[in-house]
Image: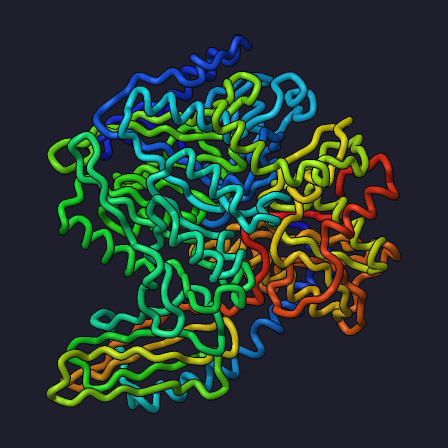
Amino acid sequence: MNLTRRDAMALGLGATAAALLPFRAVAAADDAIAAFTGGAEAGEGGITLTAPEIAENGNTVPITVDAPGAETIAVFATGNPTPEVAAFTFGPLAGSQMASTRIRLAGTQDVVAIAKMADGSFVKTSATVKVTIGGCGG
Amino acid sequence: MISRRDFLQVSMAASALYGASGFGNWARLAAQQSLTQDQLLEFDTFGNVSLIHVTDIHAQLKPIYFREPEINLGVGENKGSVPHVTGADFRKLYGIEDNSPSAYALTYNDFSALGKAYGKVGGLDRVATVINSIRAARPDALLLDGGDTWHGSYTCYHTEGQDMVNVMNALKPDAMTFHWEFTLGSERVREVVADLPFAALGANIFDAEWDEPAEDFEPYKFFERGGVKIAVIGQAFPYMPIANPGWMFPEYSFGIRTERMQEVVDEVRGMGAELVVLLSHNGFDVDKKMASLVKGIDVVLSGHTHDALPEPVLVGETIIIASGSNGKFISRVDLDVRDGRMMGFRHKLIPIFSDVIEPDKAVSTLIDEQRAPYEDAMSEVIGETDSVLYRRGNFNGTWDDLICDALLSEREADIAMSPGVRWGPSLLPGDKITREDIWNATSMTYGKAYRSEMTGEFIHTIMEDVADNIFNPDPYYQQGGDMVRMGGLGYRIDITKPQGERISELTLLKTGEQLDPAKNYVVAGWASVNEGTEGPQIWDVVESHIRKQGVVHVEPNTSVKVVGA
């Protein structure tokens, strides 16, 4: 590939622009997640997060979290200025550890769900939700 | 890329399925240029179930020309896979001879010359003849309509889809799913669906308020055919409120909903379905991904992306059938279903050559009745073209360039934007352009041509956004349209890059200057999804422009540089 100077500049600008905003937001999300887990590593599996691939309306995106055996499930919108979206706490008599809600997303981003299990361990999962201007269908 | 021989071997090796396609046969006959209706319809009835698939008719009651895409790029895992194969590569893949009727039907090359030799395609009266012939061999064949039926013409607009409903009812479909139908407004859709003599399906049509399956549409319907219990599941276009104006059908939510589809498949299997058919408006790559994730679907009848494939594509033990658009093709799929599973298939993509297939008289009469009140207005000649006018393809077609030119000059704009829809028939050089032709390329319920100011940065953002809806490597993030058509603006696109980095070198063509991100430009466009858009209807803008031109001439568009294909 031959990069002209202009290509290189355009690439550089694009990379900066792309990196800048999410960087701050993701840092905030990392802090929020660390605050929830106390810095513990979260494992995989045992938790599902159902969210649309592309939001029909970024102001109200339906999501469902389900983690059998969880004490608490926390949801983080990693690209929002305030990433902590919700924390659902389930009592010992809860029939299932599942919750649905609608969240507001500032733009395309990863939504992260982390469950604190009864034994104090954590499991996590994430989904990319795209928020688009919309346009042209076939 | 899987060659034809590989495909057959894959199907033999990977499962107990065996398959055959009627395509090779008619390709050879067609090469002799002695096509007859009997040859087009020739099919050794097979197994115990027949499916007939029509989709994306876009209200084309009469024969039309339709040029298949020249540029149809696949990304990610789908790079170089069908349907992202065009022209000579497509002919080589399927063993089609240059200049044969099949080359004309399935590829874009020499379109003007071949169009004049082989004539128009489609026409629902011809479609009726083919359906009748299949039903003569298999009286209980299922006819399934993949949607985008009640949209796309002068008469469809003026009758709010009633012309299509009347004619389709005469063809007696068994089920249908939806996309552009919803742009008639949800009230009108419910009104029509309430009286439909067949099933209106959409497992992914949800009530937006409660996020539960909508009551107005069934997720599936059971049929008993040839002693086989068949479940047909519907999947409407997933991104309706994003790609089309959501304010026209605010009660409904859609989405791909893979988990929901698996639940529905499990439900119908639990109820004893021996054959599960997904009547889908997902688009081809989305259907491929869904078939790989959802277990238990035997056949996907795929619509939305307007692809015409002469052979099924196999994903695991699921076959995916793509049947083109605008009434140009019908797929017939015969299946052998025994002991509760699909054991084999035979398939044929039947091109509707309108000069070869005899129209069904009753349906011809019915079509003429729908058109009669509008015939005078529709048939008025507005101009003539000396270029092929077509739309289909990832980037600007000549119809789009003509529409963009109309927007630039009639609306006195710097830049024009025209939606990357895949519908709209073609015209050949020397053809008159009638009002009907203009409506075929522009008709919609939100066609007002806006004129507004946008910054260079915002224009860039829009283009990046639309490009990601086509070139995101994950098909679930694709909406199945083509790139927004730009008038008065050149650009470079690298389809391999992520969103925000694909589009560069935006150049205002009238000055040759780079677009200034901070400066305001006058932009004229149409088909805005925003409520309350103001301006003249796009068909009036285009008509006025063509009238002034008299004879339309469209130069090949060299203002889009595509990289990474």
Residue at left offset 57%, top offset 45%: B156
Observer-nearest residue: B237 or B459?
Answer: B237
Quadrant housing residue B152: top right
Percent x, y of residue B432 = 76, 31
Image location of residue B289, percent across then percent down: 36, 50
**Colour setup of the view:** rainbow
Looking at the image, residue A71 lies above or below residue B417: below
At x 39% / y 87%, what residue is drawn?
Answer: A84
Q: Quadrant of residue A18?
A: bottom right
In terms of depth relative to the viewer, which is nearer, A3 or B285?
A: B285
> In the visual, does A68 lie left or right of B201?
left
User: Which residue does the image show at 42% across and 73% down from the upper left?
Assistant: A110
Image vertical order of residue B306 relative to residue B362, above or below: below
Left or right, B32 with reference to B269: right
Vertical arrangement, residue A101 with respect to residue B483, above or below? below
What number of labels is visible? 0
Relative image position of residue B489 (x, y in whole percent): 77, 55
Can residue B315 be seen? yes
Can you tell which quarter of the image residue B341 is in? top left
- Image quarter where the N terminus of chain B lies is top left
Would you place residue B193 above or below residue B206 in this image?
Answer: above
- Residue B376 position in % (x across, y down): 72, 37
- The quarter of the rendered structure image containing the C terminus of chain B is top right
- Tell me if residue B9 can be seen: no
Q: Residue at x 15, y 32 (%)?
A: B227
